[in-house]
Amino acid sequence: MHKVLGFLMLILLFAAPAKAKDSCSTVLCMAGMLQGSGVVSGCKGFVQDYFDIIKFNSHGGISLNKTFSARGQFLNKCATAGNWPNLINNQYGRQLGF
């Protein structure tokens, strides 16, 4: 799995920039973060897309539970990601930045 992830990340580095809010690219980049690679070159925008998802409560404060849920929904749009969205969201879903 690590070799496949590394290969996909290598392809992502040399590919033309993709459109923002691409959930599969976000999953790929954040899976690398989860495995200790940090934010690699070419992934900053995709990781930022995830952390830009912030939901507020009725009083205008940040709702970490709503944010967690919205981020999970975004990652789950990538149908080929397996269990990665859950692993990523459990680790980073309630953080406000990276």
Image (cartoon, rainbow, N blue to C red):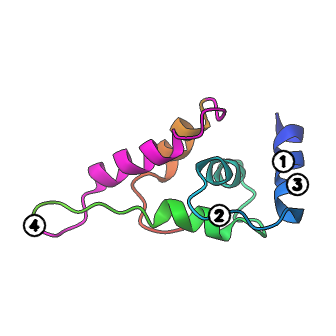
**Residue 62: x, y in percent?**
25, 65
Where, quadrant-wise, is the C terminus in this rendering? Answer: bottom right
The segment highlighted magenta reads 59-82
**Under tag 4, what secondary structure?**
loop
**Mark 2 vs mark 1: in front:** 2
The three-letter code of the residue at mark 4 reads His
Residue at image point 81% right, 43% down: 5
Q: Residue 81 carries which label?
A: none
Q: Which mark is residue 19?
A: 2
Q: Please tell me which of labels 2 and 3 falls first in the chain.
A: 3
**Under tag 2, what secondary structure?**
loop
Q: Please tell me which of labels 2 and 1 falls first in the chain.
A: 1
Q: Please tell me which of labels 4 and 2 falls first in the chain.
A: 2
Read off the residue under disc 3. Answer: 11
Instruction: Confirm or deny contact between disc 3 and disc 4 (CB under 8 A).
Output: no
Measured Cα–Cα span from mark 2 to mark 3: 16 Å
Measured Cα–Cα span from mark 1 to mark 3: 5 Å
Looking at the picture, tell me which residue is in the foreground, 39 or 43.
43
Read off the residue under disc 1. Answer: 8
Instruction: Confirm or deny contact between disc 1 and disc 3 (CB under 8 A).
Output: yes
60, above or below 23, in the image? below
The three-letter code of the residue at mark 1 reads Leu
16, above or below 92, in the image? below
Residue at image point 60% right, 63% down: 47
